[in-house]
Structures are given as structure tokens and as C-alpha cells.
Amino acid sequence: MRITKHEHACLEIEHSGDTLVIDPGGYTTLLVGVTNVIGIVITHEHADHWSEDQLEHLIKSSPDVRIFGPSGVAAAAVRFPIETVEAGDTIDLDPFTLTFFGGKHAVIHESIPLVDNLGVLVNETLYYAGDSYTIPDVAVDTLAVPAGAPWLKIGDVMDYVTAVAPKRSFPVHEMVLSTIGKSLSNARIKSATEAAGGEFFALQPGEDIDV
């Protein structure tokens, strides 16, 4: 299974000739050239995690694609055939198995309403919690770690990585950071991953990892 990191929170996963896309949002360059997409997972409704342009483009190139998200995504993306999923659901989308965890977005501020948010575990290997620190009740091989966000403190990220203790990790959700900020976050995530016995990969947009 090959994971390609795109800008911000978007991931492309290829397996056995098929592709799964996670969180193709407005902070990500239009996914031109991404084909054979059989599934899209949108963790929550915020615009940096999905956009109409991205969905329209992906559906045009892969018209049979299935799109999964929590109820908040279905309400926000009413023009699109969103299949609503909840924490505890497992979807068999051969060659991918998707298991969902969580329920709510991390707190940004008490004045900002919480929205639905689901983490997703792909093929019992890759876990991405969206905008949350939800810890799945299973071992995690590869963890996509949020590196920068209005709801995020790097100490909390380090505690999250320590609690999950993945075999490997890489950063996501960092388009709000400067180059210096990315280096700082990467160093902290790396130290927490290695302290838990894992390996850190400082992937840049366009780079990939085989798991």
C-alpha cells in the first residue's frame, strides 16, 4: 500500500491498482492526474478538508467513486452522494477496509461550535484522526500526525503520538505553518515517535511511503 502526501490534510492511498483519497480540501492543489479513485473519505465539513472543486474533479475522472463522511459532511455537501458513516462502522471497499473512530472535532474555542469528525483506519495499517486526537482501540502501524492548526498545541500532539505509539509516523495538516514552524513541529513529532519506538518520516507534498 503506497501513501502519497498532498498539501495540508490530503492523502492518496494506492493498493492493487485502486486509489483511496482522504480529505481533498481547499488548501490542496487540485488533484489532477489522480485516477482509479474508488473511495473518498472526508473526516469533517471544514473547507480545508473538502471542496466542491475537488469532488467535482474526482467524480468526473472516476464516476463510480463512493464518498464517505459523518453526518455533518452530508449536510454540508448536499450536492454530492455522501454515504454517512459513524464511529464503529467498518466499510469493505475492496481492496480497502475502512474503520471509523471518534465523533467530534477538537475544541478550537468555546465560542465555536463543535462539528462532526471521524478518524479513519485504512486496512488496519494507516490511521488519520482528522481534526482530533481520537485514539483508536487497536494497534496503529502508520499514523498521520496533525502538525499545525488553530485547535492544536504541539505538546498535545506529542502526548497523542506517545499514546498511539505507532511504528511509523508522518506530518499532515501543516499548511498554516511557515517553513520554520514545520521544522519545529517535525522535530517534536519525530522525538515523540522515536521515544515510543517508532520511525518518523518528514514527508513533503508529493512524497510517498510504502507500508
Image: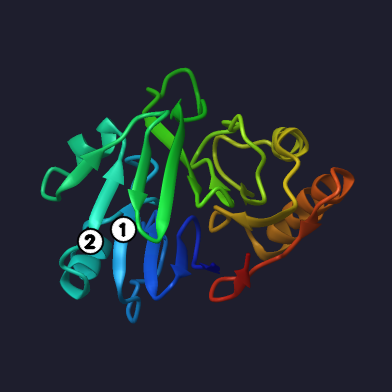
Look at 43% across and 72% down and name the residue there. 16
First in sequence, mark 2 or 1: give its number. 1
Q: Crowding at label 1, few (<14), some or many (≥20) Cα neighbours within 10 Å? A: many
- Report helix, strand or loop for mark 1: strand
If the image is split into quadrants, where does the N terminus sit?
bottom right
- Whether residue 50 sits left or right of residue 169 in the image: it is left
Whether the residues at callouts 2 and 1 have beta carbons within 8 Å, the answer is yes
Q: Residue furthest right?
A: 195
| Distance Cα–Cα, label 2 vs label 1 | 5 Å
Q: Residue furthest left?
A: 79
**Measured along the vertical axis of the image, is residue 36 above or below residue 75?**
below
Look at 49% across and 55% down and name the residue there. 9
Q: Nearer the viewer, residue 61 or 8?
A: 61
- Residue 137's spot in the image, x, y percent? 61, 29
**Measured along the vertical axis of the image, is residue 65 above or below residue 33?**
above
The label shown at residue 5 is none
Q: Quadrant of residue 156?
A: top right
Type of amino acid under label 2: Val
Q: Which residue is mark 2?
A: 65
Type of amino acid under label 1: Gly
- Residue 117's spot in the image, x, y percent? 41, 34
The label shown at residue 39 is 1
- Whether residue 57 sits left or right of residue 105 in the image: it is left
If the image is split into quadrants, where does the C terminus sit?
bottom right
Q: How is the image coloured?
A: rainbow
Q: Nearer the viewer, residue 57 or 89?
A: 89
- Residue 147's spot in the image, x, y percent? 64, 49
Q: Quadrant of residue 169?
A: bottom right
Q: Quadrant of residue 175?
A: bottom right
Look at 63% across and 48% down and name the residue there. 145
Q: Residue furthest top?
A: 110
- Residue 155's spot in the image, x, y percent? 76, 35
